[in-house]
Every structure is written in structure tokens, then in C-alpha cells.
Amino acid sequence: MFKEFKEFAMRGNVVDMAVGIIIGAAFGKIVSSLVQDIILPIIGSFGRFDFTALHLTIGESVIAYGNFIQTVVDFLIVAFSIFIVVRQMNRLKKREEAPKKAAPPRQEVLLEEIRDLLKKKK
């Protein structure tokens, strides 16, 4: 069982996924800081809103909808950032995969050589 687990854990896809998750978590922290420390204060300055302070009290329950708004903004920024990164990666990949001028088939090359030789004889 240990041997099978080791084979599973060491496959390329699992390792790539783990690296992606770790980088994604770090990227999420950066974006959360960007939203919380830069974007929301700028938006809040226009409407005098501190989104994290927005809440609704019903009886003894507190509904913190400001935190929800901040989380939605976080998500939108993360999603847009990932979209831009993936879009750029796809563009680079398309450039690399651009069809290179394939060498003509051997028959065509020989026919062209014969044609050129015949032209020289005339």
C-alpha cells in the first residue's frame, strides 16, 4: 500500500497540482491584501463606506454583509487576475505552436531540381 501511495504522490500531475495550490494560496493572500488595504479604502472614500463595518442586526444576531461584499470583490479580482495570466499564457503558447513552414515532400524537391536542371539545359 505504501509503494502504491508513493507512486501516486510522485506522479507529475500530483506534484504540479500541489505546487499550484501552494502558489494559489500565496497569490490569494496578496490579492486579499490588495483588496482590503488598497481597493476597498479607495472605493470607500468615494461613498464613505467601510465595507467591513457594514452589518445588519436582527435581535441578537449580526449579519455582516460588508464582509460578504469584500469577499465578492476579492473573488472578482482573483478571477480576473487568473484570467489575465491564463490568457497571456495561451497567447505565448499559440506563438510557439504557430505552424512552421513545413519542408516540402521529397518528391516535390526532386521535381523542382529536375525542373531547374531542365531550365539550365535550354
Image: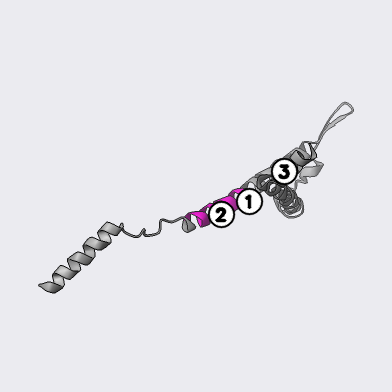
User: Which stretch did the figure color magenta?
Assistant: 82-94
Callout 1: SS? helix
Callout 3: SS? helix
Residue at (23, 66) in percent of width and height: 113
- Point out the tag, 2 or 3, that comes first from the N-terminus: 3
Residue type, numbered disc 3: Glu
| Rendering quarter of residue 5 | top right
Residue 61 vs 70, above or below: the answer is above
* Residue 37 position in % (x across, y down): 77, 54
* Residue 54 position in % (x across, y down): 79, 39
- In the image, taking residue 2 as reference, residue 43 lies left or right, namely left
Query: Disc 2 versus disc 3: distance between alpha carbons?
Result: 30 Å
* Residue 97 position in % (x across, y down): 47, 55
Which residue carries the number 3 mark? 7
Residue sitting at the far top? 59
- In the image, taking residue 8 as reference, residue 58 lies left or right, namely right
- In the image, taking residue 77 as reference, residue 32 lies left or right, namely right
* Residue 119 position in % (x across, y down): 14, 70
Which residue carries the number 1 mark? 81
Which numbered tag is attached to residue 89? 2
- The kind of secondary structure the magenta stretch mainly shows is helix
Residue type, numbered disc 2: Met
Residue type, numbered disc 1: Ser
